[in-house]
Amino acid sequence: MRIPETLSVILLAISLSACVAVPVVDQEEASPSSCRTYTKSMSLKTVQINPNCGSYNECLAVMLTVSAGSVIISGSIVLTNNTVHWLEYQGTCSKGYLNAIRQQFIDSFNKPKPHPRSE
């Protein structure tokens, strides 16, 4: 096979199986039920699309643009949301890293300071 024929077959396969990525809220939380957070973790879900186009080139351009755009935008939404969710969990839940470090810092002020020996 020549390169243009191979490329057109690959592009046809991609366009026929065009999907868009959409952000969805995860139903099951990995965090313990004792720690309630306002934000929820998210993930990407793929949805099949079948646009009505006039020609093959139109369909290919639309599907590739929409698919790539949805992955970039939805991925950014999920990444941002999960970062905020992680920070909220770490800062508010008792088993969170940031909360544990904050508590160690506060406890360091409450410890009695050793008195220097006078000789």
Image (cartoon, helix red, strand yellow):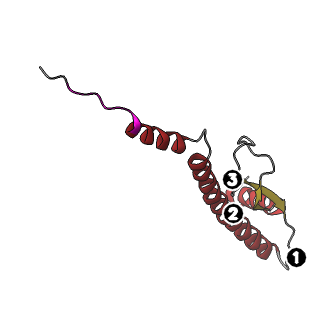
The residue indicated by pointer 2 is: 74
Nearer the observer, 118 or 30:
118
Residue 16 percent location from the top left of the image = 84, 61
Q: Main secondary structure of the magenta part?
A: loop
**Amino acid type at image mark 1:** Asn
Disc 3 is placed on an element classified as: loop
Q: CA distance from mark 2 to mark 1?
A: 23 Å
Residue 33 percent location from the top left of the image = 75, 43
User: Which residue is depicted at the point 85% across and 77% down?
Assistant: 53
Q: Is residue 37 above or below residue 105?
A: below
Q: Is residue 4 above or below residue 94?
A: below
Q: CA distance from mark 2 to mark 3?
A: 22 Å
Disc 2 is placed on an element classified as: helix
The residue indicated by pointer 3 is: 37
Q: Give the label on residue 102, or none.
A: none
Report whether 97 appears left or right of 6: left
Whether the residues at callouts 2 and 1 have beta carbons within 8 Å, the answer is no
Q: Quadrant of residue 50?
A: bottom right
User: Which residue is depicted at the point 68% across and 68% down?
Assistant: 69
Name the quarter where the C terminus is drawn. Answer: top left
- Write down the region rendered in magenta: 110-116
111 inside magenta stretch:
yes
The residue indicated by pointer 1 is: 52
Counting every numbered tag in the picture gives: 3
Circle 2 Cα neighbour tier, 10 Å, few/some/many (<14 / 14–19 / ≥20):
some
User: Which residue is depicted at the point 70% across and 42% down?
Assistant: 31
